[in-house]
Image (spheres, helix red, strand yellow):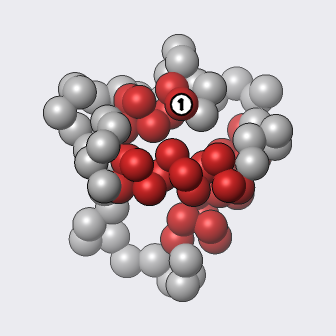
Amino acid sequence: MSEATFYFYEESDFFDVMGVIFEVGDDTNDLLVPYIQKIDSEISKEKINEVYIKASLGKISSRQFWCELGFVNGYE
């Protein structure tokens, strides 16, 4: 796994990109999935999407999102 540092916020924070304009049609699969797989290619697209949906629905915090993907110590 490549070295990366994630910044975690309070448990009340939620995963959101409101107000951000992307040039791609599917920002999750076109941007987030490749970004995470660049750090750890063993994390499947399906797993990333599963955890992303929970985060975007507010069921888990942004910290929990990254932890569930295996980044328990954070990343940068």
Q: Position of residue 47 (x, y in %)?
A: 64, 47
Residue 68 image point, x, y percent: 54, 30
Which residue appears at 62% of the width and 26% of the height? 70
Residue 17 falls in which quadrant of the image?
bottom left
- The residue carrying pointer 1 sits among few (fewer than 14), some (14 to 19) or many (20 or more) residues within 10 Å by Cα, namely some
> Left or right of 2: which side holds 69?
left
Above or below for 9 versus 28: above
Q: Find residue 18 and report its image quarter.
A: bottom left
Q: Residue 51: in sight, yes or no?
A: yes
Q: Which residue is mark 1?
A: 68
Q: How many marks?
A: 1
Q: Where residue 29 sits in the image (x, y, percent)?
A: 62, 67
Q: Quadrant of the N terminus?
A: top right
Identify which amino acid the numbered label 1 is placed on: Glu
In the picture, measured across the screen, residue 8 lies left or right of residue 76, that is left
Question: Is residue 63 positioned above or below 30 on the image?
Answer: above
* Rendering coords of residue 12 (x, y %): 17, 33
Looking at the image, can residue 76 be seen? no
The structure residue drawn at horizontal position 81% and vertical position 42%, both measured from the top left corner, is 41
Q: Residue at x 63, y 70 (%)?
A: 30
- Classify mark 1: helix, strand or loop: helix
Q: Specify the farthest residue to the top.
A: 73
In the image, is residue 7 above or below residue 36? above
